[in-house]
Image (tube, rainbow, N blue to C red):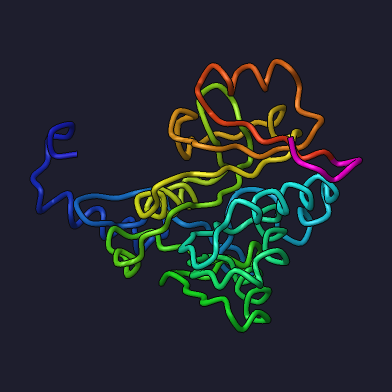
Amino acid sequence: LSRRLDASPATLRRELDRLQIDGKLLRVRGGAQPCIQVRDNGLHLQGVPFHENINRNRAAKEVIGRAAAALCRIGDAVIIDGGSTTLQMCSGLEPLGLQVLTNSLHIVSALLQQPNTRVSIPGGVVFREQNIVLDPFDDTNTRSFHASRMFVGAAAVNRHGLMQNDIVLVQAERKLLELTDEVVALVDSSKFQASAGHMLCELAKVNILITDSDISDVSAKMLEQTGVRLIVADIKHKNIQ
């Protein structure tokens, strides 16, 4: 901002502070970012609320979740990002004794029923509609956690990468991506026809993508050309290819 505008850093800091008080932006270390949006009932993100999304393409999400759980090994440390598809992993994790870091209160609730699963959550703000905890700031209390895999959903998948609807969600998820060796995307086939405006990560950074058997040949070829390992979960026969 100091390079683009004819104003001193001190003046810019005062103006940014004023705009934050007015609710027009969020101050972060070294600058500002789009403001977390507020409704009368609290903080919210762009996109479909969790309670509306949970039953969309439910059969596909269930088989995708089982396929994702099958990738986990006994004692693994993993990150499970919040989402209606990643939630479907939980029922298959009980015997594995995993260490799980998740930002989803729904996933926390499901895993608390498993005595052998250790659960951690990041610090941050609770977004009620999606029941997730996001930290939109630069510092984080999860830096000491390291995962073998991060399981993540997306609002859309295209040639650019995994896409999300909200920049605050993207910023928080990118910090979690820094803590993992591999990225596993869980997306039902409808996400290849969907659209969203903010890129979470490039396809080249996705190691494995799990989807259902309705994926088109064009989408499958796009993943193959990018070097993503594709796992297809069959909805009808509930097996994995």
Instruction: Name above or below for residue 81 compared with residue 106.
Output: above
Q: Main secondary structure of the magenta part?
A: loop
Please give left or right for residue 117 compared with residue 67 in the image: left
Q: Quadrant of the N terminus?
A: top left
Of 54 and 218, nearer the camera is 218
Of 60 and 44, nearer the camera is 60
* Displayed quadrant of residue 40: bottom right
Instruction: Name above or below for residue 158 compared with residue 100.
Output: above
As for residue 39 lying within the magenta part, the answer is no
Please give left or right for residue 180 compared with residue 157 in the image: left
Q: Residue at x 83, y 51 (%)?
A: 58
- Residue 123 drawn at (x, y percent): 41, 72
Q: Residue at x 58, y 60 (%)?
A: 44
Please give left or right for residue 210 compared with residue 59 in the image: left
Q: Residue at x 72, y 58 (%)?
A: 88
- Residue 96 drawn at (x, y percent): 59, 69
Q: Residue at x 60, y 35 (%)?
A: 196
Q: Which residues are magenta?
A: 235-241
- Residue 101 drawn at (x, y percent): 48, 67
